[in-house]
Amino acid sequence: MGRVASGLVRAAAAPVRAVLFDFGHTLVDFQRTQEALHAAYQQIRDRIEAVAFMEVPELLDLVERVAGGVDRLVEQSYREGRLEEIDQAVLLKEALAGIGFDLPDDVIDHIVILDHSAYSNSITVEPEVLSTLQTLKSEGYRMGLVSNLTLRADLMRADLQRWGLMDLLDATVFSSEVGVRKPDPRIFREALRRVGTEPAETVFVGDRLYDDVSGAQAVGMRGVLTRQFRQEDDPKFSPDAVIEHVKELPGALRGLGGVR
């Protein structure tokens, strides 16, 4: 069972009615395998060749210069503490223009979809995660997802449907659609609005102490740290509960004043 943090009395006044989840490294091990990346970029290379009358870089060079370049820009924005989300289509368009391919928007749109497939084909949802969310739904909790992602929201929702998560969630919010990242309070408040609950009766579950736990607590929610895919420790932050796996969440919620 998850550990409920000391000092919880302040938060236990309101019963827990809803749970908001981070996505990557909370519900899934968010990754992009080399095999899936290369498969996606072979299709991207073919698409560029079909519309550009120029020599296209070899596959590994294209992956490094485009996918790698985009990744580096996104990582830099996080290191700089930027809370404004980046438009992935703009990043890909600029990366391709930087190697000589000024492509029309419809081609860029197709490339965004192909690039996204590298993630779609790399991620799986553990049966225990699905069964835990099914348990929470059967116990009457409202549930939502709040994720920092440059990936397109419509493509992510299609993935969630395919993985069996979408029907378990009452709302999904992505930084790519609202324009700001956690811990900006606006993305949390938008999720609360869509789920239809107040902060005091909502718990947020995530793997990041600053973005997830502290960000959620700053708007009045309780924050649960999950250590299933990432292990963060920092005495400056005080999660309301800590779990080692999402399957421990029903017990942790009961300790926080959830359904009994």
Image (cartoon, rainbow, N blue to C red):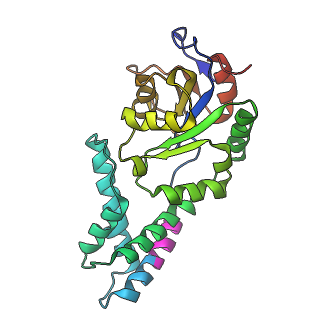
Q: Is residue 257 left or right of residue 110?
A: right
Residue drawn at x 52%, y 50% is 30
- Does 122 lie within the magenta span? no
- Percent x, y of residue 215: 41, 29
- Percent x, y of residue 184: 36, 35
226 above or below 1?
below
Residue drawn at x 49%, y 45% is 173
127 above or below 222?
below
Out of 202 and 244, give the one closest to the viewer: 202
Residue 33: tell me if it is visible: no
- Does 34 lie within the magenta span? yes
Instruction: Locate the N terminus and report the quarter of the image it occupies.
Output: top right
Residue drawn at x 44%, y 83% is 46
- Percent x, y of residue 201: 57, 22
Most common SS among magenta residues: helix
Residue 218: tell me if it is visible: yes
- Percent x, y of residue 164: 68, 52
Q: Which residues are magenta?
A: 33-43
238 above or below 182?
above
123 above or below 48?
above
* The quadrant where residue 226 appears: top right
